Image: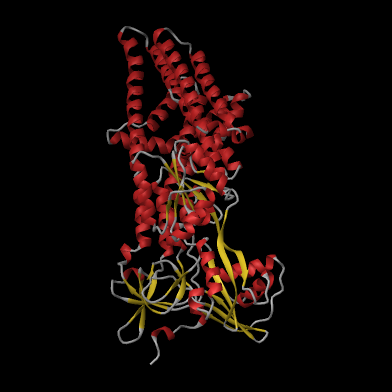
Amino acid sequence: MSSVLDQRPAPAAAGPRPAAPKRRTRILALPESRWALVALVLFLIALPLNLVGAPAWLWIPLYAAVYVTGGWEPGREGLKALKDKTLDVDLLMVVAALGAAAIGQVLDGALLIVIFATSGALEAVATARTADSVRGLLDLAPTTAARLLPGGGEESIPADSLTVGDTILVRPGERVGADGQVLDGTSDVDQATITGEPLPVAKQVGDEVFAGTVNGTGALRVRVERDPADSVIARIVKMVEEASETKAPTQLFIEKIEQRYSIGMVIATLAVFAIPLAFGSALQPALLRAMTFMIVASPCAVVLSTMPPLLSAIANGGRHGVLAKSAVVMERLGQVDAVALDKTGTLTEGTPRVTNIRPQPGSGLDEEGLLALAAAAEHPSEHPLARAVVQAARERSLPLAEVSDFTSAPGAGITATIDGRTIQVGSPTRLAPAGGLDISAAVQALEDEGRTAVLVLRDSNPVGVLGIADRLRPDAKATVVTLTELTGRAPVLLTGDNERAARHLAAEVGITDVRAGLLPQDKVSAVQAWEAEGRRVLMIGDGVNDAPALAAAHTGIAMGKAGSDLALETADAVVVRDELATIPAIVSLSRKARRLVVQNLVIAGIFITALVAWDLIATLPLPLGVAGHEGSTVIVGLNGLRLLREHAWTGTLHKDVP
């Protein structure tokens, strides 16, 4: 009776599943973004007409349209909050803008509307993209699974209806439908989405497999060990959501400040209007004084105190390949005092390469001969290790011999015939050459260095060993040194890879604290433990398995080229060109931006205090009040724009090292 594993589908069904469509909310699909864009365009059309002295009937309607389009969303939300007996700053700004228009300062009010409409749109986009990233993670898990029936047949059922104890069949190229244990079969499984390991892992009877990982060339029969709702991939979704919510207390604090400021402004404005009336003042002068107070006390300069330095830093970082997703992110980058790094795809390039070529003495082969022989045999294979060997031969322009009788054994290696001789390339433990003491020593030496050893046999006799490893990024060591100087403590390595490989690589870059063999929840636990100690952790990673830690950290940075969609969406910033050296540079730039923010807040505070005092104690002429208000806005704006200069990027690094 044939085994269930022999009951395979037609080749067309055995290929890899197509990638799930990428879910990404379009910016203009959000109403906040559309209204803000319309308001900005209308403002940019009206402004030059106003400044050149065009007839008022040309630009007044345009400004009015700015008030309607830009003030619609914040005004509506403000009224909703007011209905719940909450007064927020958005409604206050709309009222201030209308107050400015009421006394003829239409331009001031329109500018205020545009600033707050744009801010609201950015917040809506960030919220939508976060939701997209979490939903997109669910696409990693297959929607169906082949459940084996007691009578020997099988049925296709929704993966989320599997129960513990079910047995499923995972064919070549398919994603594993549930967390479980292999009952029968051998294969190589790509589980980089879960553990971050750069190479597929050989799986055999008794080994654990995870939902969402990709099966290689063998077929596996797997017993379901966890409910789909409790799988590792499902827990990653839950951890990303929970970790994102841990930032809410900071947001609540900001909302409390906004509430108090809003109430204070309303009370103060009403008092400035009502008190003179109570003492016999005429209505028009009292209203003019109150509107002047609202204008000079409005936080335009305070808003611009924060945004231009941070936005300039974002623009400068973007020119150099680092994209910070918001001004809040840019500010938080400068606060970090601890760094956690992923290994594969972050400190390393994420692509296996041949690093060592060691021919067996007496084999008659030199390095190029051994590499050419192995590459010729591996050429028909699609295994990542095989591709690394073939690529190394191509880089040396080595000719590859013709191959016949090619076969592949999952988890063991390949066998091929070249010039009438049998060539085997694969795992030293599976090929098990006879009498290979010297070759065993060579294998052990490579593995001690953190390399993956690949044994080459010719007619069952060992002729050499290849060492394959994920290559360290050229700027990794310098980056670790600089991050240590910036934060005052050495970075920590968090990886799902094996401890020996992790410690060997960590030693090369000067990292002593290594946490290896970690699953996503282990990385989150480590980050949360440091955060609980009061550290502000910068997490740097690239994979799906890093996403929960990226979300849990004070700030997360993803590597752009090799980064998974989830990591790129979850992270607060993205290194587009995968240049590690830009990370300490952006941290330094953030620190300089935060210093400029403090400077601007002091300048804005002095102007607002002086103008408000003048308006309350004496009589502040409206034109002078507007000039002082706009003057402070221009000063803080220009001060912040200094970070657009090239020197702001190149000149910050060493100045910020404590």
Q: Pick whichever, 441 or 494, lies toward us.
A: 441
Which color scheme is applied? secondary structure
Q: Is residue 549 left or right of residue 37?
A: left
Residue lying at 36% horizontally and 35% vertically, measured from the top left: 78
Q: Position of residue 633 (x, y in %)?
A: 52, 23
Residue lying at 42% horizontally and 29% vertically, measured from the top left: 93
Q: Pick whichever, 47 or 330, lies toward us.
A: 330
Above-or-below relation of 520 to 77: below
Q: Position of residue 636 (x, y in %)?
A: 53, 24
Q: Is residue 362 left or right of residue 623?
A: right
Above-or-below relation of 413 to 478: below
Q: Pick whichever, 384 or 441, lies toward us.
A: 441
Residue 374, image quadrant: bottom right
In which quadrant will I find the N terminus? bottom left
Q: Residue placed farthest to the bottom in the image?
A: 1
Above-or-below relation of 413 to 303: below
Q: Is residue 259 visible?
A: yes
Q: Position of residue 530 (x, y in %)?
A: 37, 44
Q: Position of residue 318 (x, y in %)?
A: 58, 42
- How many numbered tags mark residues here? 0
Q: Is residue 322 visible?
A: no
Above-or-below relation of 428 to 154: above
